[in-house]
Image (cartoon, grey):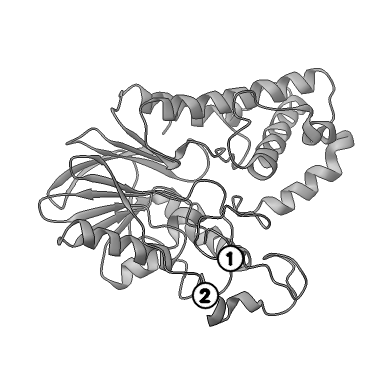
Amino acid sequence: MGAGAPLAAAVLLLAGCAGFASVGGVGVGIGAPRECRADGRFGWGATEPCPFDTPAFAPAPVELRAEPVAAGVWVLRGIDGEATAANRGWVANIGVIVGPSGVVLVDTGTSRAQVEAALAAVARLSPLPVVMAVVTHQAPEFVFGAGALRERGIPLVTHARAAELIGQRCETCLNKLRDALGMREMSDTEVTVPERTIAGDATITVGGREIELIDLSQSRGTGDIAVLDRATGVLFAAGLASAGRLPELRDGEIDGWLAALGRLGARQPPVVVPGFGPPGGVERLTDTARYLTGLDSAVRAALALDTSLVQAMNGAVTVSGFESWAGQTTIGAQNLQKRWMALEAAAADGPEPASQKKNPDR
């Protein structure tokens, strides 16, 4: 791997359950960053109990606001940007679909606190009970409210691969969240594996609403499904699409992800709700695809010029058109490294391996 190897190893150690910044914040009136003044750092490396985990420094209550998307469909918008102690990690969107007899949630948030705020928001929208929650994939911003829902008897459904990954990975993710956001914020939050799973596309009627679960589990290594409300055509693309915040590569592979975006785009949904950022049209899918192809092209061009990974990580490689999106120094750096290493490995092995070739979504 040459000159870039030491830096590559270092960044991989930091990647983990990427998406949780240890510095900075986006001040939105949710509470002060929990800088642990015992040693002047956030989260990782704090060697003494953090004073900001005491009741006096508890985060202010937050009311999640429901934004209407279509008839009977809302989104509880996450805070734009990366997850930090300042924004409590409440960065991912939670979908709400209200049917004649019940409500379906699409994803469960970062913590018990967030999903309880989501349930309060739903109660302001409708007197109907929440009758199901769909966990679209394995990622920390989407899964950790599930335990509070199970306690209330609300069924949880996900893809079989996502359920497996939650069981394998999410204890580590939870510990990192406790470091990054504080023990108080993550109080009573636990790893919960959904009890209902799908393997393949499925159409279900729940709460009197017909919902399509689209199996995209082979797209990017997190067991993804997308959720389509058939009454309105609203598509919840979840972690497969992002707006204003860089999407996260997990294993450096992009072809399956691009195929998944193409499959969803072919449906021409009138509204796409991304996992991060505001709802929009099909451009939410095409913009994410442009970022992935731009990243791939930039890394390939740098490799062809014998640019080192160190040079690339220090700014020699950028993805044009996405400079204003959040996550440049964290998610962007990790994406660059992962794609770089995947392409280097493919070149070292000769012909592109099957795992790097374009493949069906499932």
* Left or right position of 308 against 126: right
What's the residue at 36%, 69% (across, down)? 148
* Left or right position of 179 against 195: right
Q: Quadrant of residue 339?
A: top right
The reply to whether residue 86 is in sight is: yes
Q: CA distance from mark 1 to mark 2?
A: 9 Å
Between 178 and 163, the one lying in front of the other is 178
Mark 1 vs 2, N-terminal side: 1
Please determine whether, in this image, residue 258 is positioned above or below residue 230.
above
Residue named by callout 1: 32
For the N terminus, the quadrant is top right
Q: Amino acid at mark 1?
A: Ala
Residue 29's spot in the image, x, y percent?
50, 60
Please determine whether, in this image, residue 240 is positioned above or below residue 140.
above
Q: Amino acid at mark 2?
A: Ala
Please determine whether, in this image, residue 321 is positioned above or below residue 11.
above
Residue named by callout 2: 58
The reply to whether residue 360 is in sight is: no
Between 25 and 172, the one lying in front of the other is 25
Residue 318's spot in the image, x, y percent?
70, 27
* Pointer 1 local density, CA inside 10 Å: few below 14, some 14–19, many at least 20: some
For the C terminus, the quadrant is top left
Residue 107's spot in the image, x, y percent?
37, 53
* Pointer 2 local density, CA inside 10 Å: few below 14, some 14–19, many at least 20: some
Q: Quadrant of residue 251?
A: top right
